[in-house]
Amino acid sequence: MASFCGRTVNEIKQTIRERAHEAGFDAVGFASADADEANGRALAQFLKSGLHGDMAWMADTDGRRADPGKLMPDARSIIVLGANYTPAADATEILRRPDRGAISVYAQSARDYHDVLKRRLKLLGRWIGGEFGGDVKIFVDTAPVMEKPLAQRAGLGWQGKHSNLVSREFGSWLFLGEVFLSLEIAPDRPTADHCGSCDACRQACPTDALPEPYKLEATRCISYLTIEHRGDISPDLMANMGNHIYGCDDCLAACPWNKFAVPTNETAFFPRAELTAPRLADLAGLDDAAFRKVFAGSPIKRTGRDRFVRNVLVAMGNSADKALQSVAETLVGDPSPVVSGAARWARDRLRTLDG
């Protein structure tokens, strides 16, 4: 067996795994840095079909997304790391409270997970470089890395029919990050697909964004509509968005593999109380300054006040709460077209409750 620094490859892998767990990661796997042609073709077809909508950044990476070597030319191995963020409470309970806004579990946390993972990855990367030498680069999901296929190759889980990663240990609740290495370390065995005949995630989608297993139409996905989409939302989609105001966990929460997941013990991922069930009426009144203050340090901040209030108004229109009609009315004259348009839709929809 080959050795490096007096240690076998298996010993190095085990040492890195232990160090990664000490750094706060719950899942650790190794993959080669080779490009995967099948993933590249799938991405190209996705982009050609226009299913990425307003996410132009998916196509603006000069092919880097499908080829790790274009991000780090001397990369030979990739460590894929997962952090468990399983919620302690039922992620779908909020859907039964129509006067409140549903915020995706990952965005409720006390700290933005990007910052938490980046700090951990930097510590791990520095240690690896100092211990074994070679070049090291780290990435969180803001970089052009096809994380979920890499995670499957590294044995962390498989891409389920909802297109997200599913772990036998953590269900659908893993944050991902990567360390690219110039060291050549034997990859782990890829994880097989264990979805079987289950179709729970697709059936749970309110907007039919999963027309086929493993195929996501992002432009119909509530996460896309509430976070990435910049303009007006079509009425047929608004009517099916329920009270989701930032992201959506419906397909994730429906996965039966979640029964094996244990709630995270990482305090940075615990929800902020004010984001677990915020009142729609309160959120609708936020101006830009108040929005920035409320969501400082949160990924929600990047949507901006206008898109966020648009989402809140859509939820109001779906609430069947007549008392919210007057709130929507106050925003019909908002300077932002996306806000005023959603306000008119919500007001008119609530007016129909008069019978």
Image (cartoon, rainbow, N blue to C red):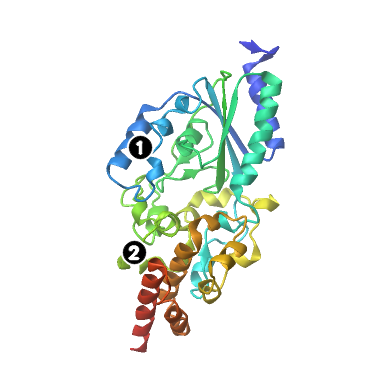
Residue sitting farthest toward the left: 49
User: Where residue 41 sits: x, y (%)?
Assistant: 32, 32
Residue, x 46% and y 24% (percent of image)?
A: 69
Mark 1 in CB contact with mark 2 (< 8 angstroms)? no
User: Where residue 126 sits: x, y (%)?
Assistant: 68, 28
Mark 2 crowd level (few <14, some 14–19, many ≥20, 10 Å Cα): some
Q: Quadrant of the N terminus?
A: top right
Q: Is residue 221 visible?
A: yes
Mark 2 residue element: helix
Is 176 located above or below residue 218 in the figure? Answer: above
In the rendering, which numbered label is found on residue 237? 2
In the rendering, which numbered label is found on residue 43? 1
Q: Nearer the viewer, residue 163 or 56?
A: 56
Q: Amino acid at mark 1?
A: Leu
In the rendering, which numbered label is found on residue 162? none
The Cα–Cα distance between marks 1 and 2, rounded to whole angstroms, is: 25 Å
Residue, x 58% and y 48% (percent of image)?
A: 260
Residue, x 63% and y 59% (percent of image)?
A: 271
Quadrant in the picture for residue 39: top left
Q: Amino acid at mark 2?
A: Leu
Is 314 located above or below residue 301 in the figure? Answer: below
User: Where residue 305 sits: x, y (%)?
Assistant: 50, 64
Residue, x 33% and y 89% (percent of image)?
A: 355
Mark 1 residue element: helix
